Image: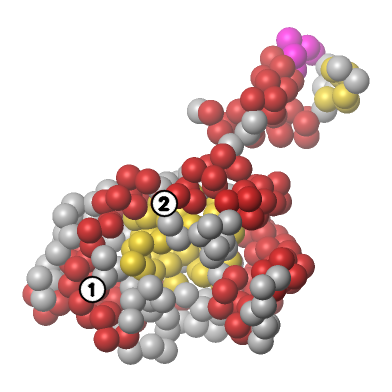
Amino acid sequence: MAEEGLRSSGPFAPVDRMGAKGPAWLFVPGDQPERFAKAVAAADLAIIDLEDAVRAEDKAGAREALAAAELLDPRQICVRINGFGTDHIEADLALVRALGIGTVMLPMAESDQPFDSLDGLTVIALVETARGVMEAAHIAAHPHVSALALGSADLQLDLRGRSRPDSHARFDDLLGFARAQLLFAARAADIAVIDSVHIALDDAPGLAREAAVAAIYGFDGKLAIHPTQVQAVRTAFAPTPDELGWARTVVAEARSRSEGAFALDGELIDEVVIRRAEMLLRFTS
């Protein structure tokens, strides 16, 4: 289907806010439509990528592929558009609006960009520059932004970091700072926050460690670049059986008591602890 003939409404219904998507958000190249349905089936949110995953000469074709794709559940997809200042953003936005897709991921997000031009769309702001990290609070505060996501590869490039065999591990200290900036900004604005991809596909232990750190920090999920990474992300973010057992015991005991604080198995249980237990149990609801 040619871009000139895009319909004014389509099979996609706009999504107003991100909501609870689940922790595993999977990129799928926009010029490989045969993978769209597989990504939707595998992940909690499939991100159809019209930006980095598609060569400049193939971007028009990727838009045509998305326009011609079979019906997809709009609650399970978003489109990573090309960024402000590129030659492709207007065509990308025309496409998502014509198809009624409600959620977009904006790359290279910085606070002085014209977010108002994204009116009517739910925006995942992909923060992947030093300036974006330092401006995370301003980005998160914009009413169109419903989630922050961290882009570590472009951030390392923007920081002029070197790529060596052990550089990823050494870069973790700087990523820790960026994660903290985004986490505090997102929580202050009451929006979701998603950790960066783990680019080494053959490094399952490294992915598990990264996902566990993000979950412990309080992130809502992690970006993935291959379906094989999805389960590791879900496992890291899911409460363990021991955590769920503790949470059920705490909540049940709290309901049976009249006092505000009490001791349970050597632990002081007060309102904050009860709320933490309730938060864990919401993962199973």
Q: Is residue 136 magenta?
A: no
In this rendering, is residue 135 above or below 225? Answer: below
Determine the image quadrant of residue 64. Answer: bottom left
In this rendering, is residue 206 above or below 126? Answer: above
**Disc 2 secondary structure class:** helix
Q: Position of residue 151 (x, y in %)?
A: 56, 70
Q: Give me the C-alpha separation between circle 1 and circle 2.
A: 22 Å
- Amino acid found under the numbered disc labelled 2: Pro
Residue 17 in sight from this viewpoint: no
Label 1, on which residue?
Answer: 63
Magenta residues: mostly which secondary structure? helix
Q: Which residues are magenta?
A: 253-258
Viewer-side residue, 246 vs 274: 246
In primary-sequence order, the first of circles 1 and 2 is 1
| Residue located 56% across and 33% down the image | 283
| Residue located 61% across and 77% down the image | 155
Viewer-side residue, 250 vs 238: 238
- Amino acid found under the numbered disc labelled 1: Arg
Label 2, on which residue?
Answer: 227
**Disc 1 secondary structure class:** helix
Question: Which residue extends farthest top?
Answer: 256
Q: Position of residue 17 (x, y in %)?
A: 43, 54
Question: Is disc 1 in contact with disc 2, using a CB cutoff of under 8 Å?
Answer: no
- Residue 1's tag is none
Determine the image quadrant of residue 9. Answer: bottom left
Mark 2, residues whose alpha carbon is within 10 Å: few (<14), some, or many (≥20)? some
